[in-house]
Amino acid sequence: MKFINRNLLAATFLGAAMAVGSVGCTGLGEKSAGQTVDDAAIVSKAKAAFALDHTVKAMNVSVDSYKGDVQLSGVAKTPDEARRAEEIVRALKDVRSVKNDIRLVRN
């Protein structure tokens, strides 16, 4: 039973990742299925790490990944929050580069 559930979960994740990759295509080139899955994993791991971190407000930071090049956007209340979000993403597997476009919001 566990074997079937794992396969179903893996197939669901792969299907969702491929759907996200095809919808978000920017015309910059084609991604392989593996790259699409890697990008989806980067985004998922980043958001999960943000949620666990006491400095970063996960709902305020958007994460986009294209072939391992990650762009962060959104708002932060402090420079420490913006810097910490970038540090978290840089530490993730398969991340090639990070562009931090997080803006500071005035209180």
Image: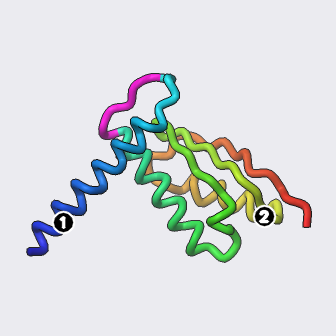
Left or right, residue 48 beside residue 4:
right
Q: In which quarter of the image is residue 104?
A: bottom right
Q: Is mark 2 on a helix, strand or loop?
A: helix
Q: Mark 2 points at which residue?
A: 80
Q: In which quarter of the image is residue 11?
A: bottom left
Q: Mark 1 points at which residue?
A: 6
Residue 93 x %, y %: 44, 52
Residue 96 x %, y %: 52, 40
Magenta residues span 29-34
Would you call the spot at circle 2 few (<14 residues within 10 Å), some (14-19), or many (20 or more)?
few
Q: Which residue is pictured at 58% across the width and 40% down the height?
A: 97
Q: In this view, does 34 lie above or below 91?
A: above
Q: How far apart are marks 2 and 1 (CA)?
A: 39 Å
- Comparing 59 with 99, the one in front is 59
Q: Is mark 1 on a helix, strand or loop?
A: helix
Residue 99 x %, y %: 66, 42
- Say which amino acid is labelled 2: Asp
In the rendered image, the quadrant that contains the C terminus is bottom right
In the rendered image, the quadrant that contains the N terminus is bottom left
